[in-house]
Image (cartoon, coloured by chain):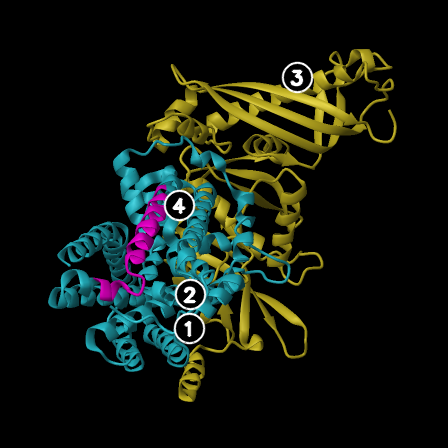
Chain colours: A yellow, B cyan
Amino acid sequence: MKWMIVCMLLLSGCVQPRVLERQGIITAAGFDKKGKLYEAGSVMLSFQTAGSSMSEVIEATNKTSKGIRQDLEAQTSHDLGSGQIRIVVYGKELAEQEGIFPLTDTLQRDANIGSLVYLAIGEPNAKTVIKSKKHEDTPDIGTYLYRLIEKNLRSESLLAATLHEFIHSYYDIGKDPVLPCLSLRDDKPIIEKVALFRGDKFVGTVRLDESFYIKMLASEYNTGLKNITVSRDEVAPLLIKKKGKKVNIVMNEIRTKRKITLVSQKPAPHFRVTVKMQTEILEMSEKMKPIMQANVGILERAIEKQMKKEIEQLLAKLKAYKTDPIGFGQIYDHSVRKLQLTDKQWLQLYEDARMDIDVNVSILRTGTID
Amino acid sequence: MMKTPNERLSVNAYLVFFLVHTAQMGLGIVGVQRVIFVEARQDAWIAVLISGLWIHLIVFVICQTLKLSEHDNIFSLHTFVYGRVLGWIVNAAIVAYFLMAYTSILLGYVEMALTWMYPDFPLWGGALILVLLTVYALYGGGFRLVAGISFLTFFMTIWIVVVVFQPLKYAEWIHLLPILEATPKQMMNGVLKTSYTMLGFEVLYIIYPFVKEKERVHRYAQLGVLLTTFLVAAVTVVAIAFFSPKQLDVTIWASLSMFTIVKFSFIERFEYIVIPLWLLVILPNLLLFMWAMTRGGKALFRVKQKYLLFVFGCLSFFVATLFKQRATINEFIDQVGWYGFWLSFVYPFFLYVFVRMKTWAKGSAK
């Protein structure tokens, strides 16, 4: 029986060894459109025996993404490995004209690549973002972009950006994906906007403070800051000075719970959106009277009113873009029995859909002073 | 009638729980979500529960059948019921089914391991490793080793269940609504499709004579089935919530794809732990089916189990090497599920009636 063990051990030698120094680890990739071809750049990280690592951007142009991979292999002495790929950036133009699903599909198909890869849109194109030399103290641009998105997802208003979530929303009927939009400021990639999609096509962007509401309505939202501007009249009883500009209020440690229900289907879908929000006040642009149990309500109502207005504006904007990142269609589809909704049908219904918004704010604390 | 295997070869009744459960658990659960979902949509988990209930009933019937003559396994029962010639044919069919089931597990696992981890490794190489492993284990061990292995692998792998909860972070429970939308026909098809995943409890027919306390077999077998049903239903619910409907339609190994979300600070790609570990999950499957095969072969040809081990090992390896593409492998697995359905989900009732009638006829003839 010993020969069997020997045989098993020998067979296990059939798999190719991978030597770290020989590997070129791709940490980021970017895709753009150039005529009929895809133009791609990859950030390759390699390790030297001496201990330090170096990164380099290699570029290629081809018809398919795996074809690009072959062209890339021809440009380096290292074996390219895509198992550590952190982020894939798609050029705005490519996403707008062609849609990016075929390119994400190949990522999903490749068992080497995990589902937690971040996707993003690059403005003006992916190449300039990937080739940026400014990546703070991280070893390469791929790691920088990854950390940038990760941090903003965790604590700020940025929305879901992983490959899994993109594919999930793409396939889900009545829900459209969103991705972070990377733009350059002084040659350094930053997140200023959120890219909206219809299916897999880029349709437009919203500012981060607007995406706060999308995040809030699409799922539960925790932590993060929100700045809100209310008119003077609303909070008049609290103010000491009677004249001046609008009042800015910054809220922190926001916890929200949202509930969306379909009230009626006919003639057009009618939703009721209820948002319950708990928060604390971090900053006010003006000196106010001490906020007590009795008068905190005034502030809360003012914030509610303003938020409701902003949400309504946002929903109107989303409707104009014909995109539904919040997933009203999904709720519609799953609330109605025996219904096989298609994206096309939903798009028509969405235009006339009515959403009643009800925001309920409660201020828990006002910092260390009243 | 066969003799009871002696004390040295028999096992305690509680091991039946592990034997039945590990025989059921295997390759199916890695990708079962899609096949049921395609049929029963968001009610797929209900189909799993129905199928589970049905199996509880069958296990009851199987134990009732075996109680009628305690020293028999399915092969000697067949000779008893159908006579020499017809019995031999039916037994040959059962052995063929075990051979197919064994080969399908072999192929399915190797195919999965190759796609995920070793794209440059040949299919025959993987199959050879697994066949050698089974032959090696059974050559030195026999049934008590099989029981021991299913006991050990159960505890070595059950913790994976805890990790399944991590994907819940991305779950959208709304996918489960509306409940009970599937038509009875869709639901029935869904139940049919669970068969491959839930198969394995039929080994009861063969292990029964090897258990010391016969009166407790039934209870432990039911518990084993209960755990399987619960786990399959749980992964189905999680998968429906985790994937969007159209996405689940195209995801082959839904359970594994869910593991791609799992991430610990010390290991980034958890699926690379799960796939090798899954060998431990399918190992009791392979061993039990191979052992059952040689048991059947012994009844058919009156040859020592040790020689049959090599014959069946070579045979399954040969069959496995015939397959090249995923599509044909899938078709093969579907076929096995279909035969398994008739053999394990339907046939036990008939066998019970036949054995009942035969014993009654014999009794009155005296």
- Pointers 1 and 4 in contact (CB under 8 A)? no
Residue placed most toward the observer, A249 or A193: A249
Quadrant of residue B62 within the rendered picture? bottom left
| Alpha-carbon span between mark 3 and mark 4 | 39 Å
- Tell me the kind of residue under disc 1: Glu
Determine whether, in the image, residue A244 is placed left or right of residue B319.
right
Q: Earlier in the sequence, mark 1 or mark 2?
A: 1
Label 4 belongs to which residue? B247
- Residue B19 rendering spot, x and y as whole percentages: 42, 62
Residue under the point 75% across and 11% down = A233
Q: Where does the magenta region start and end?
A: B50-77
Label 2 environment density (alpha carbons within 10 Å; few <14, some 14–19, many ≥20): some
Label 3 belongs to which residue? A305
- Tell me the kind of residue under disc 3: Lys
Residue under the point 67% across and 79% down = A50
Determine whether, in the image, residue B90 is placed left or right of residue B260.
left
Label 2 belongs to which residue? B212
Label 3 environment density (alpha carbons within 10 Å; few <14, some 14–19, many ≥20): some
Label 1 belongs to which residue? B7
Rendered image: mark on residue A148: none
Q: Split into 4 quadrants, where in the image is the N terminus of chain B?
A: bottom left
Rendered position, B320 above or below B310:
above
Residue placed most toward the observer, B98 or A144: B98
- Residue B361 rendering spot, x and y as whole percentages: 15, 54
Say what secondary structure mark 2 lies in.
loop
- Residue A286 rendering spot, x and y as whole percentages: 83, 22
Residue at the extreme front: B366
